[in-house]
Image (cartoon, rainbow, N blue to C red):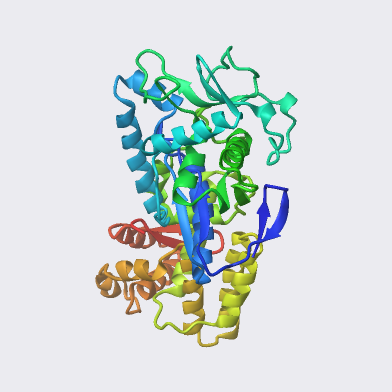
Amino acid sequence: MKLYNSLGQKYQYLELKENSIKIYLCGPTVQSPPHLGHGKSVVSFDVLIRYLRSLNQKVTYVRNITDIEDKIIDKALEEGIGFEEISKRNSLIFKKTYADLNCLEPDFEPEATKYIGEILNLIDLLVDKGYAYHSPSGVYFSVKKYSRYMELSNRKVDDTVSGERINLEEDKESKEDFALWKSSKEGEPYWESKWGNGRPGWHIECSAMVASILGTEIDIHCGGNDLIFPHHENEIAQSQAGYDVETFSNFWLHNGMLQLAGEKMAKSTGHVKPLLEYIEIYGGEVIRFFYLRSHYRSPQEFSEELLKESRTTLNRIKYFVGNNITEEIDHNLIEKFNLIMDDDLNTPKAIALIFNIIKDAKRSDKDSVVIKNTIGKIMSVLGFDLNDQYNDFEKINLKDLVDEFYLEGKTNLEIIQSLINKREEYRGSNDYKMSDEMRDRLLEFDIELEDNIEQTDWFWRNS
């Protein structure tokens, strides 16, 4: 399996192994609810986990929650409540939206505040080894003491600043040094330490949680490409220096940013679209499918038109597959899918493969049961439970429409297609009153028709 490793900026082969592959994903900082950009990151690497497990590879998957950070504290002060309330409220929203996107739950989901002891132990190691120093404003990692700093981002130290999420402190030895421990100010939350009351810096949290759960050396570290510097760069430095390891993570995978009018979505600028809002309108599976139509490393432009197009495209796959009848699949097609996914998780090409399979099946008019099962299997690896959705959909009773509009079909899928065909006849004869009546009757079942130039598509609002 070939993956693009940001460490070295090259493709490398990930070897499957008997023991578990250790994967860590930088989870959210929960000062506010998630936006659409958060969804792209978690879905991108959810596909990685699903695909590896489909190959019978054991995976230990960790996704953290940063529940203490300057912006969380600022939000709590603004609302006049404790930071814990802000963190808990938004953490629950993140978990709900991730579930709506059909993302797997991680094996471990650590919260930073539960690992203060481990964080302090790592800081102690760094101070003892001369990589960190104490000043009145906190404890800082001395960048000049670590010769391999910037090996991930390939930047020059002189061209950067620390990247801290607060103003630079005057008592740092160098502007590039980054905080491991921040001395608490009046009214701020704190924990006790040998360096005084304070709280952890942003970067040190992940290093301590990774080491505590997965060990000091892991296989894959994931996150958005906006985290390469400073967050992941600093993780590497403090982990390798503190734990005396040559390589903290063998692979560093980074997803591209979701863009709105050509600019990155970011909470810091307010240039965002709320994820929960769009899930409520389009459903989590449509949002997920939208993400996968773009390669995970590529920037992706967002628009409602693209969401609607994704809904239509996904619906065509669902309509073709229907209900999986048997477990029999075409192993040659699965092998083609695996070869595509082995090429750096190329989900757009995998979706193109699905439509080529559908096109070939319709053109050859061959027995499609195995083909449908195979597409259902591929979609399952991509994170879509079509069989469960079909069973829920078929529980709707559309039988009355058969007699009402003289339709054919036994299943709901067949009835809807028959209605669409009959409606086209009315539209062709300019009987728009009957055409609209058929549309309105389907709306009573939360089934909406969408007329396009080539054909009429439909979708179920509850899916």
Rendered position, 156 above or below 455:
above
Please tell me which residue lies in front, 51 or 294.
51
Rendered position, 2 above or below 165:
below
Residue 224 picture location, percent across and down? 57, 43
Please tell me which residue lies in front, 367 or 239.
239
Please tell me which residue lies in front, 194 or 386.
194
The N terminus lies in quadrant: bottom right
Most extreme residue toward the bottom is 367
Asked whether residue 34 appears in the rendered view, the answer is yes
The C terminus lies in quadrant: bottom left
Which of the 4 quarters of the picture holds residue 149? Answer: top right
Please tell me which residue lies in front, 49 or 249.
249
How many marks can you see? 0
Which of the 4 quarters of the picture holds residue 117? Answer: top left
Residue 155 picture location, percent across and down? 73, 34
- In the rendered structure, the answer to whether residue 410 lies left or right of residue 57 reads left
- In the rendered structure, the answer to whether residue 331 lies left or right of residue 276 reads right
Residue 324 picture location, percent across and down? 41, 78
- Name the residue located 41 percent from the left edge and 51 percent from the top edge: 282
Asked whether residue 456 appears in the rendered view, the answer is no
- Name the residue located 64 percent from the left edge and 59 percent from the top edge: 344
Residue 308 picture location, percent across and down? 49, 52
Rendered position, 241 above or below 24:
above
- Name the residue located 49 percent from the left edge and 53 percent from the top edge: 43
Rendered position, 136 above or below 421:
above
Which of the 4 quarters of the picture holds residue 361? Answer: bottom right
